[in-house]
Image (tube, coloured by chain):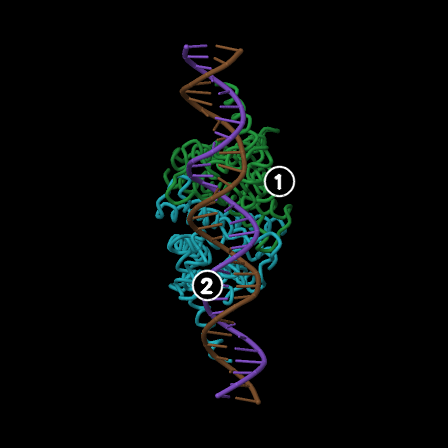
Chain colours: A cyan, B green, C brown, D purple
Amino acid sequence: MTKALERREKLRIALIQAAEQMIAERGLAGLKTRDLAREIGCANGAVYNLVADLDELILRVGSRTLFRLDEALTLATRAGEPSPREALVRIALAYCDFAAANLQLWRALFEHRMAADKLVPDWSVHDQMQLFRHIYQPLAALLPGRSPEQLGITARSLFSAVHGMVALGLEQKLVAVPLPALRKEIAGLVRAMIDGLAARDAKASAAAD
Amino acid sequence: MTKALERREKLRIALIQAAEQMIAERGLAGLKTRDLAREIGCANGAVYNLVADLDELILRVGSRTLFRLDEALTLATRAGEPSPREALVRIALAYCDFAAANLQLWRALFEHRMAADKLVPDWSVHDQMQLFRHIYQPLAALLPGRSPEQLGITARSLFSAVHGMVALGLEQKLVAVPLPALRKEIAGLVRAMIDGLAARDAKASAAAD
DNA sequence: AAATAATATTGAACGATGTTCAAGATTCCT
DNA sequence: AGGAATCTTGAACATCGTTCAATATTATTT
């Protein structure tokens, strides 16, 4: 009972890789079971032996994308000894760069929507939370007066704000903005947000004396 | 040659309204030509006498949504005489409230993606630009040192940042955050961004003396 | 007002798609 | 080696958006 399972596992991996490549090349809407089957050399029905449905396959690709994104964000603050403020700027720019370099795969993370009745499996939800931790530590250094809960919320807000700038900035619909200009804007607004938050906390802490 | 055209025009309007209601109730993916045809009382093929394809229909609904959103943002700063800073906060909260109250229609604005070859018609692109103008005026009052071009870019960045917070905040995927908490977060981060931007500009202008 | 031309509407049909499942091929255990 | 268990297959199904020849309706002409 090993030969069959080995083959299955190899095919499973090939399937996920083929799906990743297909999304990267043709977008989430370009992912077709028959093309996938032809690509990995099996019947189209066989896809459903490897994966429950397309939703799971998309989530599996999303998991890989999130992992690579996590690596990119980790790498962003490795070089030198950036201040917490500059670390946050670097993370934001790394997020922007990753999205630009992996446009379709990054879009798929947010475009995909499960059927209303089915719910996202645990392993997928868990992946998504990990991103905020990159922001959490520098933010904690910058805003020492805040509780862990407050910091978690603020970290998510900061991430969301940068995500919005990247999302609308990379959208062709609105005025196409060149990538360097977008990076400059992101860096500027991140610094402004941080300064504004720190000033507010400093004032609150002074008033408490 | 008037009887036929009148009927057509009435049906066209009914079609767009039916599509709007259907998206609001079942989401963009729940929009089906056969259901629309049954709803407005015509053959499913007749939909293509009223509208080129589903893309156009979705854009027409989007146009209506953008118009209502514009109204909501206009209304936000009408009452009282808010300072520019508070006007921007109100606009951001109005955006959040509109998105929450029109969740599916608001999502459709950003979920929809044209086929790669076809391009968005002019009348639809034009609509989208108008939103930034609400932000432009208060921002110009707060950052007097900036050129119109700089203000336009910053206005778009501010809008994008708020959009990101609303988009990820209303997403069920991530930790579901209650609406009042989201509104508080948005107000806080908008104030922080404005303060940070103003402080930066003030410092630059002082250095120029 | 009747006949004819022009136009609009219809709904069956097409091609694509995700998904299922009985039949056939393969693998595993004794 | 042979039978049981399992896996793979690809044809079939349901559902889409979209098209188009046939039909019904409206407009124009005599």
Q: Classify 10 Å Cα crowding around label 2: few (below 14), some (14-19), many (20 and above).
A: some
Residue located at (58% from left, 62% from top): A121
Q: Classify 10 Å Cα crowding around label 1: few (below 14), some (14-19), many (20 and above).
A: few
* B166 vs A21, nearest the viewer: A21
Read off the residue under disc 1. B101
Read off the chain for label 1: B
Read off the chain for label 2: A
* A173 vs A31, nearest the viewer: A31
When asked about the image quadrant of residue D24, the answer is top right
Where C1 sits versus B64, above or below? above
- Whether residue B135 can be seen here: no
Residue B162 in the image, given as x and y percentages of width and height: 52, 44
Label for residue A121? none
* Element under disc 2: helix
Residue B60 in the image, given as x and y percentages of width and height: 50, 34
* B179 vs C2, nearest the viewer: C2
Name the residue type under label 1.
Answer: Ala
Residue located at (41% from left, 45% from top): A185
Does residue B115 appear left or right of residue B35 in this picture?
Answer: left
* Element under disc 1: helix
- Whether residue B8 can be seen here: yes
Where A87 sits versus B192, above or below? below
Residue A179 in the image, given as x and y percentages of width and height: 36, 48
Residue located at (52% from left, 42% from top): B108
Name the residue type under label 2.
Answer: Arg
Disc 2 to disc 1, how far (Cα)? 34 Å
Tags 2 and 1 touching, CB below 8 Å: no
Read off the residue under disc 2. A64
